[in-house]
Amino acid sequence: MEGTRIIDIYRRLFNAYGPQGWWPADGPFEMIVGAILTQATSWENAEAAIDALRRAGLLSSRRMMGAPVDRIASLIRPAVYYNQKALKLRAFLDFLADRYGGDLDRLLEEPLPELREHLLSIRGIGPETADSIVLYAAKKPSFVVDAYTKRLLTRLRLVDPSAGYDGISALFTSALPADADLFGEYHALIVRHCKEHCRAEPVCGGCPLGEVCPSSGLSRSVSGSAPEESRAG
């Protein structure tokens, strides 16, 4: 039943919003930088910091590796917690240099379990950031769970508010084919939906999930017919 609902939710979101083209980045390294910079802040703030790094010519692993940490911190101020995030970027770069000779492709070519384990060993990279890198930079099927995901599934009563990261991720990975493009699209659709409708203060009018969301007051039987178009079908 839960698996059927996970697929139905994807279909409804995809038909409402269409493909999202996420993650917006020019190459894997920029994506990784963005994943670290967007921690505990909005994508708009992270994007402003990325633009500053780009203007400074530091959006390559080699060039950033040669930059002082305080220089990186000064450039990424829009992303907030910039001193800590500069140290996280340096920790990633040090790991890349020590274990892979600075070769990002070698790291990303690692099998999914090993890649995720390596990323989690780096200071400042937790499950959400690691899964984002695995999914969007390495193009391997590891589902990203963020605050939006938990908010949505809690309101849909698919998880308890106390549910942990791994349990929420397993809902998706057990219901869907192991397809990185599908996982990436689903995560992006959840982000889009939670920005437009499933906000901290929900906007239920016009919500594409209103019919199947017990929290909306508009729901009917979740077994009702779903839209046809879906990569998950």
Image (cartoon, rainbow, N blue to C red):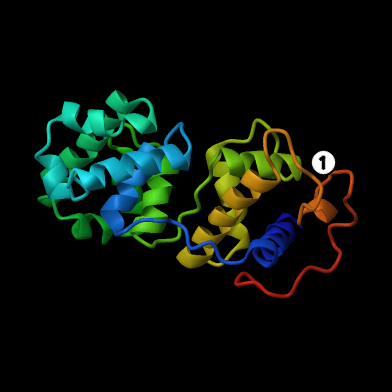
Q: Is residue 31 above or below residue 128?
A: below
Q: Is label 1 in a helix, a strand or a loop?
A: loop
Residue bearing the label numbered 1: 215
Q: Nearer the viewer, residue 81 or 179?
A: 81
User: Which quarter of the figure has residue 173?
Assistant: bottom right
Q: Is residue 58 left or right of residue 23?
A: left
Q: Is residue 182 above or below residue 159?
A: below
Q: Is residue 39 left or right of residue 185?
A: left
Residue 179 visible: no
Residue 151 screen position, x and y as percent: 66, 39
Residue 100 screen position, x and y as percent: 14, 51
Residue 24 screen position, x and y as percent: 41, 56
Q: Is residue 50 above or below residue 90?
A: below
User: Which quarter of the figure has residue 124?
Assistant: top left
Residue 103 visible: yes
Q: Nearer the viewer, residue 197 or 54?
A: 54
How packed mark 1 is, by other alpha carbons closer than 10 Å (few <14, some 14-19, many 20 or more), is some
Q: Is residue 21 above or below residue 134?
A: below
Residue in the image at 65% along x and 72% along y: 230
Residue in the image at 65% along x and 50% along y: 193
Residue in the image at 73% along x and 75% along y: 228
Q: Residue type at mark 1?
A: Ser
Q: Is residue 12 left or right of residue 129?
A: right
Q: Nearer the viewer, residue 230 or 40?
A: 40
Give the quadrant of the N terminus.
Answer: bottom right
Residue in the image at 23% along x and 40% along y: 92
Give the quadrant of the C terminus.
Answer: bottom right
Residue 113 screen position, x and y as percent: 36, 53
* Number of marks present in the image shown: 1
